[in-house]
DNA sequence: TCCATTCGTGAGAGCGCTCTCACAGAGTTG
DNA sequence: CAACTCTGTGAGAGCGCTCTCACGAATGGA
């Protein structure tokens, strides 16, 4: 066969018009039983499947949504956050006819690259945007494209008036820090996440708030960037500068795992000498020695929520935004 | 503006015909300088970007390829293999104008679901298929769609005559096991991967081959499925049944990490009492206690290669298939 | 000087589909 | 029984684009 069968072929074979064949394909109820059966038989016989480009051209719907990851480096791949997001999106998309299109930034590619091209090209009905950095002006593109979108995590730019879903990072960090305070820590440090991401900023702010409320000093800060290497180096610096710390809040579990190793290597017992709390509750939190006390970051649930919001947006319904999930502390062995 | 600008609008604004405007958009060299500039100005002024559906309809090219993951459960998300694959594909795709579309199986969805619909709909120019299980009859769909595709990992079904790229899992397992033999182990067990995947089968076969060549028994086998829990349980069973083992080949690093913990909990020293070799060389291999000796599974390189093959296929060029990469042993602390 | 070639451009035919509109025939109402 | 609604169907326009073909003007060799 040189050419894929078209609706025209189906219609001819079934002895009906193209319009009727189209109705059957799209499950339009206003079709007689005879015609319906004839068309269905023809579809089966010819192995017909609709040409989506043609359909999209007229309906202006693509039945797919983009998951946009502006992250340009490899970090996103080692980050379990990423996998959790995809999982949630996929979960939320089952039951719908929508497909997920992963649109990733290329190394060394600006906003003007393929990604923008893709979004502007009307290739998707909507977008979920994750991991939004300070520099990204992506929301501008989305704004003037009018493409319905939901951000996963509060956009860094305060002037980006887009719907988003997030966990309350400030409250989460506060929860973690308060837990350290309640168990008797008085000299509490923190290893921060990237300060060009809202999650990094907020978790630092939450730590500060808890300390301020307790009247404790908030000077033991070591800046990191959510990477393992960064977390390790920051922990070393922190304890070199503040050898007397008895509590540590680390802005992510991956960094916390590194911190635990640094502390172990330095001969400090956890939680006896230093109590440690992480953030995210990744799988690895259950496997550290001792198991990591941490704050649950409900990534998958957030992703599902984001998709639900996007679906509402696509249906023209109003959405509740921002949608902020409450964090929860999981007490394990490290604090 | 109620409607996105079309090529017609651009042409009118630039005072040229639609055909000429189209030529400028597609970088056709046979356009005069005046016309080119006028069109480019019009494009900028109107904020035009081409409608991809319309373009696809006539060119029959979508400029995107599918990464197909038939995996129906959540395992794929916790598996770093998955991230590495996406990383490689993304890397190989930079520099091309192709986009990556992630097509994932839904929980409880058969081959007939959205995924097949999507593939059949001509929504992508080609496909990379990963993690191909025994049950998946996906390649049949791909076969009668005539969609160019490359499998990442040898397809389970021997009658699937599709191009694929893989690491030589048999040789890799052999390498690992021979290493154990060379360091003096004589009672060597294995924790296997899923036997409904070719990687699982081949790694077991390689282990067998090395033992046969050395005249050692190959009876200490515990079946697992590449999951952490499965690996842990299998290790326990294995040492309950064969308490005298002095060497262990585990078919994946994730399972090997669990095995190390089981051994540590049982009070067996690694590598003194039991030497352990894993497979994959994930990041975690560097972090285990002691660091894991393992076989490099060049996931990202494989993915890049698969994309390169797919691009050749799309260009109508012949491809070298199967493309088998050589495994390499990384000796660290556990063996 | 003339014909062949090249170059830049425009006209127009579709790509395969959906969807509006029109219409015939059957059923329903006052 | 006239005036309706309702139901199933077909005709046909048109979505925005590419690409073939045709054509006039400029160029080049004989």
Image: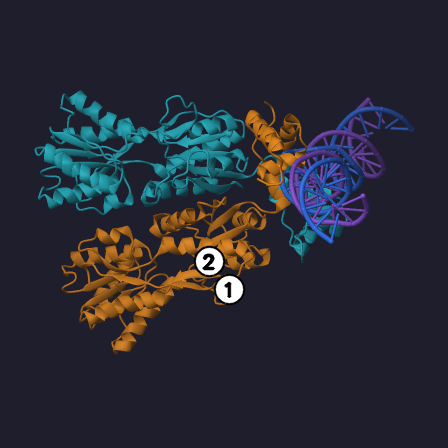
Chain colours: A orange, B cyan, C blue, D purple
Position of A257 with respect to A201 (left or right) is left
The quarter of the image holding the C terminus of chain A is: bottom left
> Same chain for the residues at labels 1 and 2, yes or no?
yes
Crowd tier of the residue under label 2, counting other residues whose Cα lies within 10 Å: few below 14, some 14–19, many 20 or above: many
Residue B22: where, in percent of width, then height?
68, 42
The quarter of the image holding the N terminus of chain A is: top right
Q: Is residue A182 visible?
A: yes
Label 1, label 2: how far apart the Cα atoms are: 10 Å
- Mark 1 falls within which chain? A
Position of A92 with respect to B199 (left or right) is right
In the rendered structure, which disc, 1 or 2, sits on the residue that comes first in sequence? 2
Position of A138 with respect to A331 (left or right) is right
Label 2, secondary structure: give it: strand
Q: Is residue B146 visible?
A: no
Residue B83: where, in percent of width, then height?
37, 44
Looking at the image, residue A244 lies above or below residue A49: below
Look at mark 2 in the image and give the residue it sits on.
A151
Residue A231: where, in percent of width, then height?
29, 58
The tally of labels here is 2
Crowd tier of the residue under label 1, counting other residues whose Cα lies within 10 Å: few below 14, some 14–19, many 20 or above: some
Label 1, secondary structure: give it: loop
Give residue A51's quadrant in the image: top right
- Residue depicted at 37% across the width and 53% down the height: A300
Residue A222: where, in percent of width, then height?
29, 65
Looking at the image, residue B80 lies above or below residue B174: below
CB-based contact (under 8 Å), mark 1 and mark 2: yes
- Residue depicted at 52% across the width and 54% down the height: A111
- Mark 2 falls within which chain? A
Q: Nearer the viewer, residue A150 or A266?
A: A150
Q: Which mark is residue A160?
A: 1
Position of B258 with respect to B35 (left or right) is left
């Amino acid at each position: 066969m040189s050419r894929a069968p078209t609706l025209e072929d189906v219609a001819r074979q079934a002895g009906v018009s193209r319009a009727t064949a189209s109705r059957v394909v799209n499950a339009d109820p206003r079709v007689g039983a005879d015609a319906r059966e004839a068309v269905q038989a023809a579809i089966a016989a010819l192995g017909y499947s609709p040409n989506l480009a043609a359909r999209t051209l007229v309906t202006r719907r693509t039945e797919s949504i983009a998951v946009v990851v502006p992250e340009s480096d490899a970090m996103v791949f080692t980050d379990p956050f990423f996998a959790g997001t995809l999982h949630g999106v996929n979960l939320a998309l089952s039951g719908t006819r929508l497909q997920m299109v992963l649109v990733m930034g290329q190394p060394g590619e600006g906003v003007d690259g393929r990604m923008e091209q893709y979004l502007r090209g009307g290739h998707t009905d909507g977008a979920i945007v994750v991991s939004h950095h300070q520099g990204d002006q992506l929301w501008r593109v989305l704004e003037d494209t009018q493409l319905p979108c939901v951000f996963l995590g509060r956009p860094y730019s305060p002037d980006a008036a887009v719907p988003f879903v997030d966990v309350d990072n400030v409250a989460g960090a506060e929860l973690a820090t308060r837990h350290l305070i309640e168990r008797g820590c008085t000299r509490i440090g923190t290893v921060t996440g990237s300060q060009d991401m809202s999650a990094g900023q907020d978790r630092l702010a939450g730590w500060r708030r808890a300390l301020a409320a307790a009247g404790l000093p908030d000077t033991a800060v070591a800046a990191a960037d959510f990477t393992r290497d960064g977390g390790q180096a920051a922990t070393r610096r922190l304890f070199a500068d503040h050898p007397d710390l008895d509590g540590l809040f680390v802005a992510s579990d991956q960094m916390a795992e590194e911190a635990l190793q640094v502390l172990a290597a330095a001969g400090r017992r956890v939680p006896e000498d230093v109590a440690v709390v992480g953030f995210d509750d990744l799988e690895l939190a259950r496997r550290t020695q001792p198991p990591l006390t941490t704050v649950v970051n409900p990534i998958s649930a957030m992703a599902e929520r984001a998709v639900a919001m996007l679906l509402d947006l696509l249906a023209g319904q109003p959405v509740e935004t921002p949608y902020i999930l409450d964090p929860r502390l999981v007490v394990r062995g490290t604090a």
